[in-house]
Image (cartoon, rainbow, N blue to C red):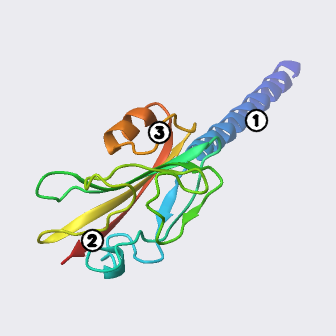
Amino acid sequence: MIRITGFILLFLISLTLCQNEEKAKTKTEEEVKIEMKIESAAFKEGSMIPVKYTCDGDDISPPLNWSGVPEGTQSFALINDDPDAPVGLWVHWVLYNIPAEIRELPEDIPVDKKLKDGSKNGINSWRRYGYGGPCPPGGTHRYFFKLYALDSVLDLKHGATKVKLEKAMEGHILVQAQLMGRYKR
């Protein structure tokens, strides 16, 4: 009788430990699953970018906002490019060292080398600082706004190219989010 009671007690303890381990495993998987999201009030994922934000309009940057930022984020970087350009990938905007507490960029971000909040504009494919809007020579092009949460503030001077920024971000990307808009002239 003592052996049976001891066996049942041992079985119940093992079962409880397994359930607690499974709960801990599930919680860890949920904590790891971080989904940062980037959006714009000006256009939705996959939709047309309004003329205002293109070379046919005011050529100003669209408003962007993001959520789901992981713990440990020290800064953000943003790259906006067009993979459909006839000459290959065309970079429209490189912006980095965006402070970690920022969760949105209003429209019409200045094209200054360094912004008031410490963010730095890089060089786009026009060899200019800041944003240059969609201006496809023909057809409908896709424009990707890629936001990176980084575990550090990058040691880069203003005016970095996309290639230099990507190199500096290696090993520092916590998570990435993307928004794609289209434009046709």
Number of residue marks: 3
Q: Residues within 10 Å of mark 2 (few under 14, many from 20)?
A: some
81 horizontally vs 118: left or right: left
**Distance between the alpha carbons at the discs numbered 1 and 3:** 56 Å
Q: Amino acid at mark 2?
A: Arg
Q: Position of residue 34 (x, y in %)?
A: 55, 49
Q: Are marks 2 and 1 in contact (CB under 8 Å)?
A: no
Q: Secondary structure at mark 1?
A: helix
Q: Position of residue 91 (x, y in %)?
A: 28, 54
Residue wearing tag 1: 16
Residue wearing tag 2: 182
| Position of the N terminus by quadrant | top right
Question: Height in image: 8 above or below 67?
Answer: above
Question: Height in image: 7 above or below 124?
Answer: above
Farthest residue toward the top?
Answer: 3
- Mark 2 or mark 3: name the one nearer the start of the chain: 3
87 horizontally vs 100: left or right: left
Residue wearing tag 3: 157
Name the one closer to the observer, 34 or 147: 147
Specify the quadrant of the image occupied by residue 81: bottom left
Q: Secondary structure at mark 2?
A: strand
Name the one closer to the observer, 36 or 97: 97
Q: Residues within 10 Å of mark 1 (few under 14, many from 20)?
A: few
Specify the quadrant of the image occupied by residue 84: bottom left
Instruction: Write the residue at 31% across / 53% down.
Output: 124
Instruction: Write the residue at 74% across / 31% down.
Output: 17
| Position of the C terminus by quadrant | bottom left
Q: Nearer the viewer, mark 1 or mark 3?
A: 3
Q: Secondary structure at mark 3?
A: loop
**Distance between the alpha carbons at the discs numbered 2 and 1:** 54 Å
Instruction: Write the residue at 40% across / 49% down.
Output: 122
